[in-house]
């Protein structure tokens, strides 16, 4: 079930182009951070947008969990999956990194809904793999293909196992020959996913609203919302040693923006909340909220 992005934005009255001043301010902030920045933002009311390297494929880290979550809702909607199905945590299922399930005892039973929410709210890696053991990476990619997303693909489960068919395709290698890890996408396609969720045209209005509510409960606010704790945020962040990313909807009284930011090839590993890429995300969001405001 998909409606093209032109349909999503059919209600736009007048498209406003971003100002040269906003572009100057954003690029000045980006230039202060070592690494490569991929960015796209869209005002969900006016359609005004702004991007830097918006269509280049990039590693997703845990932001790929958003498309997985959307695909789960579609599987439930069409009747191939039930939210109350039971999943069992085994020792071999546990993977390190973010989340809590790897700290719990084997034999724990939880529902698909429980695991899916842990995957988003605390970015639980073990919960993600439990979900993918049930659904399959190729099923997720099949939905993405049917929805018209050509660049966004789940490559494998977390921990370097459970590879999808897409993983071995020649096009799914980075320019240096390395892999994309667990997923690849572009900043523009992530914003397109968010835009269609906001419009209720991707997996149905009720499902879309539920997805955005769960995104609104995720517990990390070190990036897009770090400079203004009063903004409404529905997002999914991601992190690797040399990468920081976040995709989400940021709302204030003057604007509602869908934003995707990835900073890759960061030269130094810094797992603090003051990683320069995270600080940069907060600064950019403030500029975008002003520069892409509903009325200027």
Image (cartoon, rainbow, N blue to C red):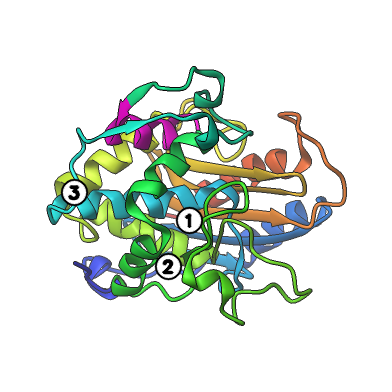
Q: Is residue 275 above or below residue 147?
A: above
Identify which residue is drawn at 56% across, 19% down: 103
Residue on which the image places disc 3: 76
Specify which label sits upstream in the sequence, 2 or 3. Answer: 2
Q: Do tag 2 and tag 1 residues touch (Cβ < 8 Å)?
A: yes
Label 1 crowd bin: few (<14), some (14–19), many (20+), radius 10 Å: many
Q: Quadrant of residue 42?
A: bottom left
Residue 94 magenta-drawn? no
Question: Where does the image place residue 175, in percent across and percent down from the top left?
Answer: 74, 76
Identify which residue is drawn at 31% across, 55% down: 71
Q: Measure how far apart labels 2 and 3 are at the Cα level.
A: 38 Å
Residue on which the image places disc 1: 292
Residue range of the region highlighted in magenta in the rendering: 110-123
Residue 112 magenta-drawn? yes
Q: Is residue 288 above or below residue 57?
A: above
Q: Do tag 1 and tag 3 residues touch (Cβ < 8 Å)?
A: no
Specify which label sits upstream in the sequence, 2 or 1. Answer: 2
Identify which residue is drawn at 38% across, 37% down: 215
Q: Nearer the viewer, residue 7 or 99?
A: 99
Q: Is residue 293 visible?
A: no
């Amino acid at each position: 079930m998909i409606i093209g992005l032109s349909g999503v934005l059919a209600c736009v009255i007048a498209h406003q182009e971003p100002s040269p001043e906003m572009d100057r301010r954003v690029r000045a902030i980006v230039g202060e951070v070592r690494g490569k920045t991929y960015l796209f933002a869209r005002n969900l009311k006016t359609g005004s947008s702004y991007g830097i390297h918006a269509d280049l494929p990039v590693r997703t880290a845990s932001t790929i969990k958003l498309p997985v979550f959307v695909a789960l809702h579609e599987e439930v909607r069409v009747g191939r999956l039930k939210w109350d199905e039971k999943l069992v945590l085994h020792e071999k299922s546990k993977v390190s990194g973010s989340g809590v399930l790897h700290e719990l005892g084997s034999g724990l039973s939880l529902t698909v809904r429980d695991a899916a929410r842990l995957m988003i709210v605390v970015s639980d890696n073990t919960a993600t793999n439990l979900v993918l053991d049930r659904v399959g990476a190729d099923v997720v990619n099949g939905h993405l293909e049917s929805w018209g997303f050509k660049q966004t693909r789940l490559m494998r489960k977390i921990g370097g196992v459970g590879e999808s068919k897409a993983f071995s395709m020649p096009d799914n290698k980075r320019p240096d020959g390395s892999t994309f890890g667990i997923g690849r996408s572009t900043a523009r396609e992530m914003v397109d996913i968010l835009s269609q969720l906001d419009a209720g045209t991707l997996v149905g209005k009720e499902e879309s609203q539920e997805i955005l509510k769960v995104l609104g409960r995720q517990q990390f606010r070190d990036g897009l919302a770090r400079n203004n704790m009063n903004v409404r945020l529905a997002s999914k962040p991601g992190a690797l040693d040399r990468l920081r990313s976040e995709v989400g909807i940021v709302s204030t009284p003057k604007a509602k923006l869908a934003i995707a930011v990835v900073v890759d090839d960061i030269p130094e590993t810094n797992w603090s909340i003051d990683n320069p890429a995270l600080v940069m995300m907060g600064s950019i969001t403030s500029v975008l909220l002003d520069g892409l405001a509903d009325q200027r």
